[in-house]
Image (tube, rainbow, N blue to C red):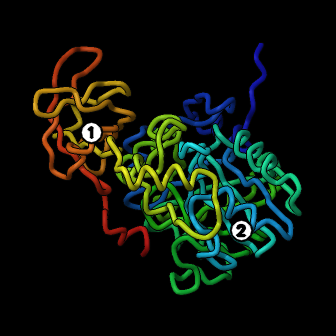
Amino acid sequence: MTARKHTPYYHKFIELGAEIVDRIGFDTAARFTTIEDEHRATREAAGLYDVYYQGPIDLKGSDATTLLQRLLVNDIDRIGDGGVIYSSMCNEHGGMLDDMTVYRHSEEHYWIVATPSRAALIEQWTVEHARGLQAYVTNCVSGTAYLSLQGPKSRDILGRLTDSDLSTDRLPYFTFINAVVADVPMVVSRTGYSGELGYELYYSRDYAEHVWDSIIETGREDGLKPCGLGALRSIRMEKKYPLYGLDLSDGNSPYEAGLGWTVRPRHADFIGKNALARQKADGIKRELVGIELSDLSFLPAPGDLIYGDGREVGRVTSADRGFHLGKSLAMGYVETATAVAGSQISITSGSTGEDYAGIVRTRAFYDPEMTRLKA
């Protein structure tokens, strides 16, 4: 029998009759009702997501900032204490090792929150480059409970559980505070993977069940629903958020992934800087784009071929149903000449051989101006 890992909320999933699937060795909830129902709850009210397996790698020491300036393509000095930054770490060739968020507690204390499937590699990479520096790396994932509360009613729900000011003036998008929620001290971060107003909560796993129960009970009157991995993936697709392992890999650069805005050339000689500079100067040959289909009837699969002007121009990397928009949505790398908003393309299904028309989108399918996200 293969040993399985459970998040602190596993028995709650079983009580609620969730469909259980594997997530990097964890038994986690794929859905509690239907993916569409949970997707719509997140867009219209609030959804509670267990993301326990995506916790912080703690970095402390007088050289912590120096180390991150060496590892990140983004500039950590752009944020102050209580700020969060989105970046990637690259290899010397400019290939993405992972994309991540980094939390700045102080000049000598940070959290690196990596993609779950890449956390061990990022921890190892950080430790390797910390040699000879006053910088100390601790993987805190197993001891840190982590819930993501997302949706337009998330502030109302969380506000009934804390005395802290959660207003946008006090806690704007991509910042965090230390707060007491449901009598539990925790980090409350204005971040998430949904594209809605939302919060990510980090606290000791000793309080995991209490916090889960408190949020579920408090949010019941607002239409809060527990949500699974299926809804998390479908709502991220509406925002055109890439996922490492499907849309991102060490075989592509941030420029190719449409994340060139995160690359901040500066005095620091960060890993991959020269390769990325050459690529920017020479121009990229392919780019990750969104593809919008007319309805929900056909869902592309990773690897399906993309055609433009009668010839192959790329491949699908991921796809999901955008239930709020009523369309199937995909992402894929295409030739730069095709990576233009409004370009007409077609996708050939690898399973049926049929062709389906699509339109290239270079911005988020849903709320491209981010008005809901920053509410």
Residue occupied by mark 2: 187
Identify the residue at image location x=66%, y=54%: 113
Q: Amino acid at mark 1?
A: Glu
Q: Amino acid at mark 2?
A: Val
Q: Quadrant of the N terminus?
A: top right
- Left or right? Give the position of 166 relative to 314: right
Residue 211 visible in image: yes
Q: Residues within 10 Å of mark 2 (few under 14, many from 20)?
A: some
Circle nearer the N terminus (2, 1):
2
Q: Nearer the viewer, residue 309 or 148?
A: 309
Residue occupied by mark 1: 335
Q: Is residue 15 above or below residue 339?
A: above
Q: Nearer the viewer, residue 130 or 36?
A: 130
Dot 1 falls on a residue whose secondary structure is strand
- Left or right? Give the position of 256 relative to 63: left
The image's mark for residue 123 is none
- Left or right? Give the position of 153 relative to 3: left
Please report contact status of discs 2 and 1: CB closer than 8 Å, yes or no. Answer: no
